[in-house]
């Protein structure tokens, strides 16, 4: 079965955490409803784009990852069980597809030239955009597993329990990855931003 022809949204569709709507959409998709699939695709596109980009650090991989993710959603919607939020199920698929794409691409880390731009700057000369850019560059230097935890925690507002379901690992592993991510980020950001 082929993935229905769905194009990315031209305008941003607000991200919604309406679990009932997503669950209803997955039920309809399981019955072959292409309109429900298109709506779900559009609801998740931007969130998946941001998540996959932050996990992989490779913009050239993101569209394929999203399409592979949504193909799984199309094909396996009937396998979704409401024990977890639909978003958790979808992001779990996207995470696994992101890691596979990195393996195929042959590089699991962002090129060093992306992080070499982390040059110390006087803290009083930095504006909010500089700080945000510095944080993005520092996070980009983390391993994909740590980037995923940071993304899901700070940008998607997921709990550690939800992250554990998405990443298919114990909650303790999520906490450990967050601890390690913070430990790696602290000196990079301290050098850049000062104390």
Image (cartoon, rainbow, N blue to C red):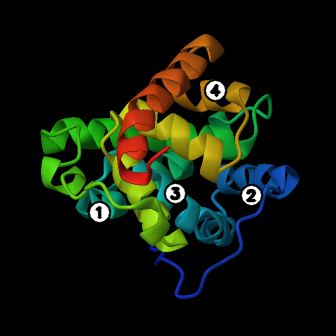
Residue 31 is tagged as none
Do the residues bearing badges 2 and 3 touch, measured as CB atoms within 8 Å? no
Between 22 and 58, the residue placed more toward the observer is 58
Q: Which is closer to the viewer, label 2 or label 3?
A: 3
- Which numbered disc flags the more N-terminal residue, 2 or 3? 2
Between 2 and 140, the residue placed more toward the observer is 140
Between 15 and 19, the residue placed more toward the observer is 15
Q: Secondary structure at mark 2?
A: helix
- Which numbered disc flags the more N-terminal residue, 4 or 2? 2
Disc 4 crowd, CA 10 A, few/some/many (<14, 14-19, 20+): some
Residue at the disc numbered 4: 165
Residue at the disc numbered 2: 25
Between 37 and 121, the residue placed more toward the observer is 121
Image x and y of residue 2, in percent: 40, 59
- Which numbered disc flags the more N-terminal residue, 2 or 1? 2
Do the residues bearing badges 2 and 1 touch, measured as CB atoms within 8 Å? no
Residue at the disc numbered 3: 48
Alpha-carbon span between mark 3 and mark 4: 16 Å
């Amino acid at each position: 079965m082929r993935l229905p022809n769905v194009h990315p949204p031209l305008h941003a569709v607000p991200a919604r955490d309406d679990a009932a709507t997503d669950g209803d959409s997955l039920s309809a998709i399981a019955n072959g409803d292409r309109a429900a699939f298109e709506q779900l695709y559009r609801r998740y596109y931007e969130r998946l784009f941001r998540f996959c980009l932050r996990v992989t650090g490779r913009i050239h991989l993101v569209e394929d990852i999203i399409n592979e993710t949504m193909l799984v959603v199309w094909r396996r919607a009937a396998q979704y069980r409401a024990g977890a939020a639909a978003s958790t199920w979808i992001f779990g698929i996207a995470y696994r597809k992101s890691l596979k794409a990195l393996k195929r691409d042959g590089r699991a880390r962002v090129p060093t030239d992306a992080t070499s731009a982390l040059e110390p700057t006087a803290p009083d000369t930095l504006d909010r955009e500089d700080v945000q850019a510095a944080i993005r560059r520092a996070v980009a230097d983390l391993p994909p597993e740590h980037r995923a935890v940071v993304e899901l925690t700070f940008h998607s507002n997921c709990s550690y329990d939800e992250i554990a379901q998405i990443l298919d690992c114990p909650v303790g592993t999520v906490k450990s990855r967050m601890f390690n991510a913070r430990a790696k980020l602290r000196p990079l950001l301290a050098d850049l931003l000062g104390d």
